[in-house]
Amino acid sequence: MVQVKLFDCEHEQDLEEEINRFLSDLEHKQVVDIKYNIAALREAEDEQIYCFSAMVMYIK
């Protein structure tokens, strides 16, 4: 059965660490695909906020 795992972090390195930790428990052949997205938002007072997210599709 194909499953998905969603990740959402404010920092790129945090996302990388979380995904690598998750993937370390899977075999290579279990991974179907990984989708990656970045969103940038401007808050009040010109503060820019980034959202790094990914979806890992895998076979359980």
Image (spheres, rainbow, N blue to C red):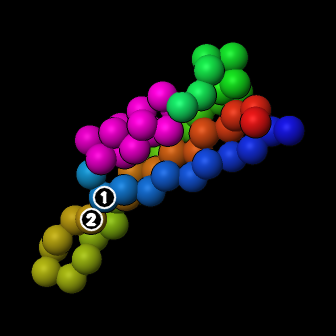
Q: Earlier in the sequence, mark 2 or mark 1?
A: 1
Q: Can residue 28 be seen at all in this image of the molecule?
A: yes
Which of label 2 and label 1 is nearer to you? 1
Residue 55 quadrant: top right
What is the three-letter code of the residue carrying label 2? Ile
Residue 23 shown left or right of residue 20 in the figure: right
Name the residue at the bottom extreme: 44
**Magenta stretch: helix, strand or loop mostly:** helix
Residue at 30% across / 47% down in the picture?
14
What is the three-letter code of the residue carrying label 1? Glu
Residue at 86% across / 38% down in the picture?
1
Numbered label attached to residue 10: 1
Q: CB under 8 Å between callouts 2 and 1?
A: yes
Residue at 35% across / 38% down in the picture?
16
Q: Which residues are magenta?
A: 13-24
Q: Is residue 8 above or below residue 54?
A: below
Which secondary structure lies at badge 1?
Answer: loop
The residue identified by callout 2 is: 49
Residue 2 shown left or right of residue 4 in the figure: right
Residue at 33% across / 66% down in the picture?
41
Q: Position of residue 17 (x, y in %)?
A: 33, 39
